[in-house]
Structures are given as C-alpha cells and as structure tokens.
Amino acid sequence: MDNKKKILIINPGSTSTKIALYESDKMVFNESVGHSADELKPFKNIWEQYDFRKEAILKVVKKHGIRLAALDAIACRGGNCKSVPGGIYRICDQMIADQKSGIYGKHPGDVVCLVVYDLGKELNIPVFTVDVPVTDELSPLARYTGIPSIRRKSSFHALNQKATAKKVSAGLGKKYEEINLIVVHLGGGISVGAHRNGKVVDVNGALDGDGPFSPERAGSVPTSDLVKMCFSGRYTEEEILRFLTGGGGLIAHLGTTSGIEIEQRIAAGDAKAAEVYEAMAYQVAKEVGRCAAVLEGRVDAIALTGSLVHSKTLMANLQKRISFIAPIHLVPGENEMEALGEGVMRYFNGEEGLAAYAPEELQ
C-alpha cells in the first residue's frame, strides 16, 4: 500500500548538488545546482563546504515552497564509509563517524551526508541512503593485487549503476538477477562494472584512481612514475591526492570538465582536445573489454549512462570500439534521484527492509 510519503532527495556530486522532492511514486521537481571551479576553489577540503552545500540545498527548498516540517524523510546519495552490500541504509552516527575519519576516502558526498543528517535530527525524521558508493559485491578474485597487503576495494557509482542495470534488464523483459551486463557510468568520475546475476562482481575503483581517466580523475597511471612523484619532495600528500581525484583527467589536460566545451573546441579545429577526448573513450573501451573477460564473454547488454552520454563525439568514439561485445543501450543522465526515492518507498511500503550498517541503530 502506498503511504503517500514526502521525501526530500539530495544527490551531491563533485561539481553539483541535485535536489528533488519525491512524493510517493512521483517526482514533484528535480533541480541541479552547479558549483563552478571558482566557487569551490576557496575550500581547502570537503568539510569546509558544509555551509556552502547546506545553503545551496535550503535555497532550492525555499524556491519550491517546500515546508521542511511536512517532510517524512530525507534520502541522500551515500558517502565513503565501510564497505557494505547493496541495499537501503539509515544514515546513522557510526556511518557519519566513518565518513569523517577519511580512512575510506574523501568525496563531497561525505559532507552533504552530514548536512542532511543534521537536518534530519532537527526535523526529527529519518535520513536514508541506498546503494552507497562503497557497495561491495566483488568476487574473491577481483580483490587480488600483486602486493598481498593491498587489496582492491569496491568504490564506484553504485546507485546509478544498479538503477541503470535494473532499468535495462526490465526493458529486455528480464529480472536484474537473471542476466549479465556491463554498466558504464560516465560523469565527473567514470566507473565500469561487471554485473552478474544481480551482483557487481568486478568494477574499477573509480574514487581511488583505478581505471580510465575521467573529466576530473587521473585514473590508473604508471606506478613507478607516481611513486617518484610522491618522493620527489615537490608535492605534499594532499597535492598528490588532488592530482588523482579532482584535478586530474580532462581538467588537467584541457582545463575543463565540460563535454560541451570540449566538443566546441574540437569543432573549431582543436586537435589536442580531439586527441585527449578520444583517449578517454579509448581507456573506457579497454575497461569494458576487461569486464567482458570477467563475464567470460557472456554479456547480454552494455549500458552507457551518466551526463557524458549526451556527448555525441564521445559516444561515437566509444561505441565503435565496444559494439562487437554486446548490444549497447544508452541511458543518458542519471537515474539516481528516482532510485533514492523508490528505495525509500520500498522501505515505507514494507517491500524491502533496512540493511544494518550499525546494528544498534536499528533497535
């Protein structure tokens, strides 16, 4: 039975904050607030963005005439916490503490989780997250590296990947748990996941710098060269990490993360922009091929999703290299807002229970 709940949905990204109101099974509004490089430049770390991100959220809430007191819940895309399986989680004290620790990584989503957690306490309503970025369903073999003390971790765009996989599966007349897919999230970061029967059994650690370079992440780089940079004495640890996440990829090569701007530069004859953009597609294609090997060639579909799917140039460069593997389905933009709202409604309607992040929080 539908409980007619009003859910404020917050989806933080590196350069944007998306805000929506989900009422039962209907999206009332969905707005994205962009954050320019100039706006973000004054902040030395993500936690300094607290007031900036909170103000952006409350401004949109006020603009759309939402009464905070009328809300039944808030749903927020998760941050970097301990690894957990996919599912619906209540944001709790321990989850916030784990994100603050920084030991699981750093992303603007961490500070926004704190913003909405504090709002939830002020309003005395629950705050949820669904399929957090550290969703971990990796197979044992996917965890190995050549250094026993270093294990591969799962850190990717789990919410959009799983939502897209379920959408494509339904379009094929199948259940997500019945087929194999490769899902490619193309946004500020890029993740490529091998989905086998409802589980993401392998995926590049997009936040940790693994896999293809992206608009703002360096991706995998030659290890020895990176080690030499670290010990050169020229850079602090924070500066090196900035190269890997936030200051690498397209923005390092071309000074922008905008696919629209890059396409305009290519059309104007910018040969460097054309080569860098194709190189990114080339690296993504290699990652898709890796996932095809993981799935032993049994791939029912490849789903391309995220904001960069709107880029015709990027899609042409990518599709020509992977179309032989399986049929390609384009799912432009993201399904994350709907996925958050639908996940919380499944909980309210008794269709899916809460997964336990910290068992005491469920008491």
Image (cartoon, rainbow, N blue to C red):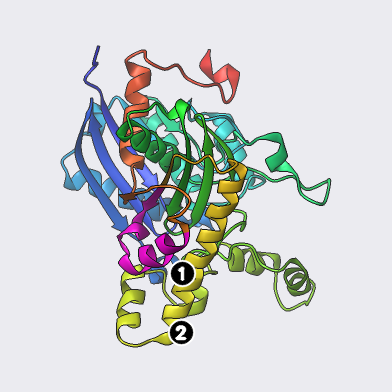
Q: Left or right: where does residue 54 sit relative to residue 297?
A: left
Quarter of the figure that contains the N terminus: top left
- Give how far across and how far down residue 278 sits, in percent: 46, 72
- Give how far across and how far down residue 311 sits, in percent: 32, 64
- Give how far across and how far down residue 71 sits, in percent: 26, 28
Q: Is residue 62 visible?
A: yes
User: Is residue 317 one of those drawn in magenta?
Assistant: yes
Quick one: SS at disc 2? helix
The region drawn magenta spans 303-321
Residue drawn at 24 percent across, 16 percent down:
3
- Give how far across and how far down residue 325 sits, in percent: 48, 50
Name which quarter of the figure residue 9 lies in: top left
Instruction: Choose between 341 and 123: the one closer to the eye.
Output: 341
Amino acid bearing label 2: Lys
Number of numbered discs: 2
Give the mark nearer the N terminus: 2 vs 1: 1
Magenta stretch: dominant SS? helix
Amino acid bearing label 1: Lys
Q: Outermost residue toward the front? A: 324
Q: Which mark is residue 41?
A: 1
Quick one: SS at disc 1? loop
Name which quarter of the figure residue 212 lies in: bottom right
Other-residue count near label 2 (Cα within 10 Å), few / some / many at <14 / 14–19 / ≥20: few
The vertical placement of 234 against 342, above or below, is: below
Tag 2 residue: 272
Instruction: Choose between 238 and 203: the one closer to the eye.
Output: 203
The vertical placement of 281 against 175, above or below, is: below
Q: Gap in Å between the C-alphas at discs 2 and 1?
A: 26 Å
